[in-house]
Amino acid sequence: MKKSIFAKVLVSILTLALMAVLMAACNREEETTPVTPDPPAGNQQEEAPPVETNDDEDDDEDVEEDEPALAPLRLSIAAPYGVHDHDNHPIRMEIVERLEAYTNTEIEWMWIGDGYWDQLALWILSDDVPTIMVIGHRDPNFMQAVEEGGFWDLTDYLDRFENLAYVHPVARENASINGRLFGVPRSRAVGRNGFGIRQDWLDNLGLNVPTTINELRDVLWAFTFMDPDGDGLDNTFGMGIAMHAGPWDMMQMWFGAPNGWGFRDGELVPAHMTEEYDEALRWFRGLYAEGLVNPNFHELGNQYWDDLLRGVAGFTGDVVDRHRRNYEHLYNEMGMAGTWTIIPYVVGDHGARTLPTAGFNNTLVVSAGRNGAQTHDEFLRVMQFLNDINDTYVWNLFERGIYEQEWEFRDGYWHAFTDDERTERGTDLGNFRIGFNQIMPFYSSPAQYEGRIPGRPPHNDIRVLESEIQPYIEQFAVVNYGASFVSPTQVEHGPALNAMIADMRIDFIRGVIDDTTKHEIRQQWLRSGGQDIIDEVNELYRASQ
């Protein structure tokens, strides 16, 4: 096979990115203290320069006085996984004092621990909601409170703030409720889904990394029938898949299928009602018919998936860290080098398209109740706080801790003291920053990102590739345009209707049903509530415009 132009471009991009990481690492080794960890005086605007006056003006003219400084904003914040065990410890107290000074706040912390998610319902039902709290955006009690005006609508405000403006479009869409955003999404990697392929098998067979759908099909055939592991046995499969449906969802993107919901003729339609979805199914069915996929994929438990990938399968789709873990397992446990590599996608007629993750995990909501922001001005100050905790200074404080008490620079990088090192230095043991990361959205502007105290870069090639390929994948993420809309019929009958379509796909891939039966199942889905879901989602979409 001849390597395509796209392959050369991709290799160049990843090579340059790797060189940049390595050069940055070399430069950092020459530094001793790349970032000052000392606290700033406060997150205040710089004083304006003195105004020049005209000596000829009347000395009795009124002089405008400076506006008085704002009093600290009083907040109550509730989040899971934190504890009150260290509230009176000097390190914990210093972290809180620095945060409050930087953000001009006085904060009441409400750490609940394991019972947090049960406590949420009690707070909401009693209208005793903290100013800011972490919540799942589809929590039924929360959604009811949203309808009753219990929480602020943030949709039109994120872009007013330096850091919050960088909330990813995918996360915004997925974290919304019927087109409106009632919480700041807590960031997770959008470009986490990618494809793993056995590089050593490619090398053994003299093949290049596939970059197109047709090239991939040829590689899968070779992996199945040309003894890529060289053991003389007919015991390999081109693609390894378990019961997890993710690989099929990821590969559908190549054929132009929507991510969940897409637009056709101005209307939102579910992916399985599109011709592009059918085109993908036909391709999958062909792979299965040729024996290029393990035949038991539909009944193979996900707990056995890694065993398949570490033994007899040469390609799959999943989160990129799975491919990295399998590489490291084969290297560390079996001494096999250069096994798995990671690729972002292959292309068909629709160009580069990738399936994103949801892009977030829970949201930070702002209460409009008695403990929340009572006025628009108070609301804006709370939003400013949520913005400011993404600043360089607070990120370093929460993620790195107190300099020379919890960490130090080593070769220009952050080094957290081990328990033994703390004991030698006379520093108390304990995680004094526990819980603080739960209130961080983890979105920062490039300017704020620049000053973060650096951790050591990835220490091997596969980890470098993993770290560099995720932002590359993210560029081609396909948004689920129906993700935010809550169809009542979907809530009531969704599990059964979803199972109907999932079974249809598996049975069609395996050749159990034909096109006629597939069409009949779709019609049954529509009659059983699917058409109501489509109508409700489109009505909600139109109402949100």
Image: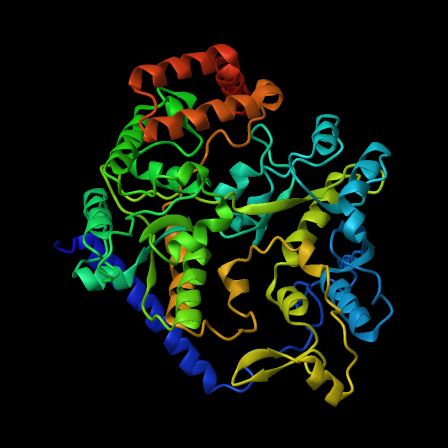
Residue nearest the viewer, comparing 98 with 476: 476
Reply above or below: 23 against 221.
below
Relative image position of residue 452 (x, y in whole percent): 56, 69
Q: In the picture, residue 459 is in which quadrant? A: bottom left
Query: Which residue is painted at 68% across and 55% down in the image?
Result: 438
Name the image colouring.
Answer: rainbow
Residue 532: give x, y in percent of width and height: 52, 13
Q: In this orientation, which residue lies closer to the viewer: 356 or 154?
A: 356
Q: Residue furthest front?
A: 233
Is 179 placed above or below 224 here?
above
| Horizontal and vertical percent position of residue 42 | 71, 67
Q: Is residue 68 above or below residue 428?
A: above
Residue furthest toward the left? 2
> Which residue is painted at 77% across and 77% down in the image?
429
Picture quarter containing residue 503? top left
Task: Please name the residue shown 31% across and 42% down the image.
Answer: 293
Q: Is residue 250 left or right of residue 76?
A: left
Measuring 72% from the left and 65% from the top, which residue is drawn there?
Answer: 102
- Residue 453 in sight here: yes
Q: Residue furthest bottom?
A: 424
Residue 279 placement, left or right of 436: left
Q: Is residue 369 shown to the viewer in this render? A: no
Q: Quadrant of residue 119?
A: top right
Query: What x and y, as percent, mark residue 337?
Result: 33, 71
